[in-house]
Amino acid sequence: MPFSTQPPASGERYALSASLDNARHLSSLLRAVHFQDHATCFATASGLRVTVEDAKCIQANAFIQAEIFQEFSVQEESVMFRINLSVLLDCLTIFGTSSVPGTSTALRMCYRGYGYPLMLFLEEGGVVTVCKINTQEPDELLDFDFCSTKVVNKIILQSEGLRDAFAELDMTSEVLQITMSPDKPYFRLSTFGNAGSAHLDYPRDSDLMEAFHCNQTQTNRYKISLLKPSTKALALSCKVSIRTDAQGFLSLQYMIRNEDGQICFVEYYCCPDENITEAEL
Amino acid sequence: MRFRAKIVDLACLNHFSRIINTIAKLARTCILRLTVCKLYFILSDKVANGGASMWCELCQGNFFDEFQMEGVAAEHNEIYLELAPENLSRALKTAQNAKAVKMKLTNKHCPCLRVAVELPSLSSSSRIVTHDIPVGVIPRRMWNDFREPSVPDFDVSIYLPALKTMKSVVERMKNLGNFIVIEANLSGEMNLKIETDLVSVTTHFKDLGNPPWATEDGCQSSARGRDLESMVEVCIDIKKLQQLLAGQQVNPTKALCNIVRKRIVHFILLHEEVSLQYFIPAIA
């Protein structure tokens, strides 16, 4: 089926249509949640949310609000589809990933609706690439039911303080243990690997600590293999908020500033590792 | 049969190393043909290579300060050697700041190309690193297997787009599928296409220009009277194209390709005094 290199006129009825002068504003955020091949895209007039899940206990969401786009329109109340995220990223970065100053890839995205493929039109330096990616039935997504009223402990840290810690996590440990407390050690990351246990403490009066609201001592363990991908979001972000609720569910929210200084968010939710009982802690 | 050569000029040495690196990316083993004036790196289209073939030709005078060669016989003053270009590439890696590189064909225990790299040292005596690269001597009766491939009767000839852009696009497309379609017309347009069950991606290049012989009447009877806009296509193994592009470390002076519809694509890359031809056959 031949299709022209020109993107369709904005007058046509597309369930979702968007334009972005710099495709990196989208691709870098999507890479921060790319730990599975498949993602669910959910678009409303407010913007785009891309969700990736694994093992029914971790969920990552990338939010790209409508204001980031030069043009963003959703015809119905909302549009939702499942798509291969690896393929989407390869298409968005078709002209390469290095950010040469002064050059950027322009993007136009169109989705006709249920059952139709996602169309991408990318242009850089006069060269145009047209992509047609098949979409699938969206999966049912986990609902962590995490709202501010249920939060027991919350801290906000400058990301630079955590970056090295996460990049160097002892991956021979099955879990990452997070302790949050109004008393010492305040905020502690622990691993239990082949060479021994490692503890990293952050005092509440540290320069890196932007906010500290811990009401109860909580120690929770999370499967380290599930949390490791969040390192990508951490690397891009300037600040991170770490929250836990009464069940030990973890919420990590990353504030990311893009090349133009606009703010976007990526969040990770993770269930505590069920295998450990309180008695063992 | 004798061969001795020496490179002293650092720029020539680096250029020579870059060429060997490119060859090493395209072939695990290949033929090195030595004549009085030229060196040739040849890969013939055996099934083991996936049918791709290569012909790279350079004038020894542009690289070597000393070059002495005596072939197998007076009437056949050439030497054909089979070697792994990666070995030569590795040997030359140690020569980045060398004072001189000498090459010599030896046969102590078995035929080898001995590469001796003279490195600068603080003391008065030089430091020499020697690499013995095993080679196979190709007997004269087999030389006909390695003749220069003839330029095919192509349907379209077109200059390539910026290799950097082409390389990025092909590398991404390689993640999406195994086969790529290259199509081009006589109006300077080229498309690279990949299509699978999951995704189809097409990159459109314009204003590339066609070499003058592409539309000359005497040349290609199949092109005569043909619509300048109609596309000629060939579907090839994407890995072969990616290897060719990945091996290009410097922008060529001229880069073009000839396509025979559904049969073969012939790439010609010219870097100053070096010409590289690479043939990729269509997927059966």
Image (cartoon, helix red, strand yellow):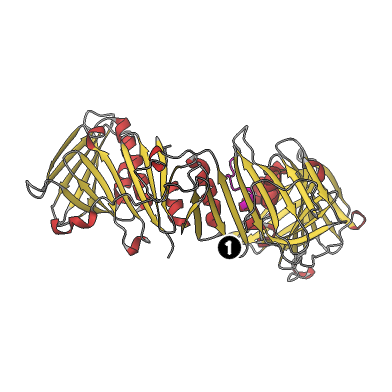
Rendered position, A182 above or below A67: below
Note whether residue A248 is visible: yes
Q: Residue furthest left?
A: B74
| Disc 1, SS | loop
In percent of width and height, residue B87 lies at 30, 50
Front residue of this view, candidates A10 and B221: B221
Q: Which residues are magenta?
A: A91-98
Q: Amino acid at mark 1?
A: Thr
Magenta stretch: residue A72 in it?
A: no
Q: Circle 1 is placed at which residue position?
A: B196
- Furthest-right residue in this view: A149
Q: Nearer the viewer, residue A228 or A219?
A: A228
- Quadrant location, the N terminus of chain A: bottom right
Q: On the rendered image, what quadrant is the C terminus of chain A found in? A: bottom right
Q: Tell me the crowding category of disc 1: few under 14, some 14 to 19, or many 20 or more residues within 10 angstroms, Cα based.
A: few
State the residue at coordinates (70%, 37%): A259
Q: Nearer the viewer, residue B203 or B95?
A: B203
Q: Is residue B235 left or right of residue A139?
A: left
**Residue A97 colored in magenta in the image:** yes
